């Protein structure tokens, strides 16, 4: 496993990270149960993944609890990342609201520390920008937590360049976590260059486009989970159909190389400029083993050009 420095931090994280959204289960995903999720976490660590990314809203605390329990014996050997800024008043998708106020962040940090069974969080990220709260207030809260030793480094997720600039007026952010994959490349135009220039690491989430890039769906697939609700990504309509057509072409390249579509998509992501790590979500040990194969080789320039042509931003 390759390990890379995350921005201007002292953290060296695995090029493939464990994305713990899926193991949280309801209201976003179905899981294979606590035992399978726990085994997948432990297997990931055994195979060299040292970066585990979760959030309170993933299963309304369930994901953090699973991560904390499974990794407690090796806490000093791994890097824990979680988030703040999303709150809920009942366990329902529609009740989730953005809240990055100082009081909320302080309370969320205490709750996350408890669920993760740890005294510190290595990377604490604002999950989504809260435009109703000044970035200055949000950063003041994060800097106070850092001063107290409860968090080591500050990151943001789903932020624009201008929002990151506002953060940098108050202090250092070491990472951005954006959606990034072959079918979602908007960060390449402005965001990636800004992050590279300012030494901000990029933690790519959904490198498999929530399953689309695995090649297991076709244009007639209908999703009944969150993917049908237009939250992020394209899982309905012409955009989805167009993406499936591109994935069909990707499958041809994968077959030539003896790889899967998913392996190609992850491999492509972790070798793009500015990317520190790609977060891969899994349900079981087998998926961990399959996904880690993505880091064992590198695409040649000709195939990279072909893939880039297929998935070029229109």
Image (cartoon, rainbow, N blue to C red):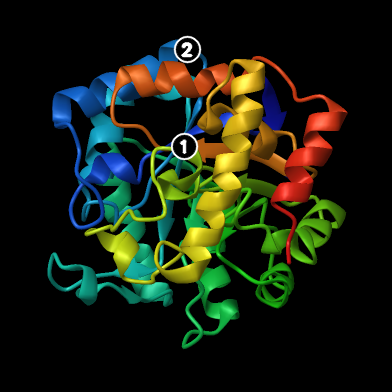
Is residue 8 visible in the rendered structure shown here? no
Residue at 31 percent across and 22 percent down: it is 40
Q: Is 21 on the left or on the right of 30, as rendered?
A: right
Q: Which mark is residue 47?
A: 2
Going from the N terminus, do you reach mark 1 or mark 2 first? 2
User: Residue at coordinates 68% horizontally, 64% vertically from top-left?
Assistant: 186
Question: Relative to the observer, which residue lies in front, 6 or 310?
Answer: 310
- Image location (x, y in percent) of residue 171: 69, 64
The residue tagged 1 is 214
User: Vertical placement of 240 versus 118: above or below?
Assistant: below
Where is the C terminus found, in terms of image quarters? bottom right
Residue 227 occupies quadrant: bottom left
Residue drawn at x 60%, y 68% is 159
Q: Residues within 10 Å of mark 1 (few under 14, many from 20)?
A: some
Is 175 above or below relative to 214? below
Residue 249 lies left or right of residue 79; in this view the side is right
> Label 2: few (<14), some or many (≥20) within 10 Å?
few
Q: Is residue 310 left or right of residue 111?
A: right
Helix, strand or loop under label 1? helix
């Amino acid at each position: 496993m390759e390990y890379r420095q995350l921005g201007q931090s002292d953290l060296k994280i695995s090029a493939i990270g464990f994305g713990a959204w899926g193991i949280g289960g309801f209201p976003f995903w179905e899981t294979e149960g606590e035992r399978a999720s726990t085994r997948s976490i432990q297997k990931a660590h055994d195979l060299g993944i040292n970066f585990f990314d979760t959030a309170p809203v993933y299963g309304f605390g369930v994901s953090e609890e699973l991560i904390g329990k499974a990794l407690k014996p090796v806490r000093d050997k791994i890097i824990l990342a979680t988030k703040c800024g999303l709150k809920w008043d009942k366990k329902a998708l529609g009740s989730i609201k953005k809240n990055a106020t100082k009081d909320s962040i302080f309370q969320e940090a205490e709750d996350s520390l408890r669920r993760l069974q740890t005294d510190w969080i290595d990377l604490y990220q604002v999950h989504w920008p809260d435009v109703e709260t000044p970035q200055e207030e949000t950063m003041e809260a994060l800097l106070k937590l850092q001063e107290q030793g409860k968090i080591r480094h500050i990151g943001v997720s789903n932020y624009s360049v201008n929002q990151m600039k506002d953060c940098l007026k108050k202090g250092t952010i070491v990472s951005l976590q954006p959606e990034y994959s072959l079918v979602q490349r908007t960060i390449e135009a402005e965001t990636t260059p800004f992050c590279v220039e300012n030494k901000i690491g990029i933690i790519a989430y959904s490198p498999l486009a929530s399953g689309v890039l695995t090649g297991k769906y076709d244009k007639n697939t209908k999703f009944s989970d969150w993917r049908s609700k237009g939250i992020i990504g394209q899982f309905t309509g012409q955009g989805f159909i167009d993406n499936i057509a591109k994935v069909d072409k990707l499958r041809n390249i994968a077959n030539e190389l003896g790889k899967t579509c998913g392996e190609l998509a992850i491999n492509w992501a972790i070798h793009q400029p500015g990317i520190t790590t790609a977060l891969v979500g899994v349900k079981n040990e087998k998926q961990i083993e399959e996904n880690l194969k993505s880091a064992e080789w590198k695409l040649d320039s000709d195939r990279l050009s072909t893939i880039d042509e297929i998935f070029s931003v229109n």
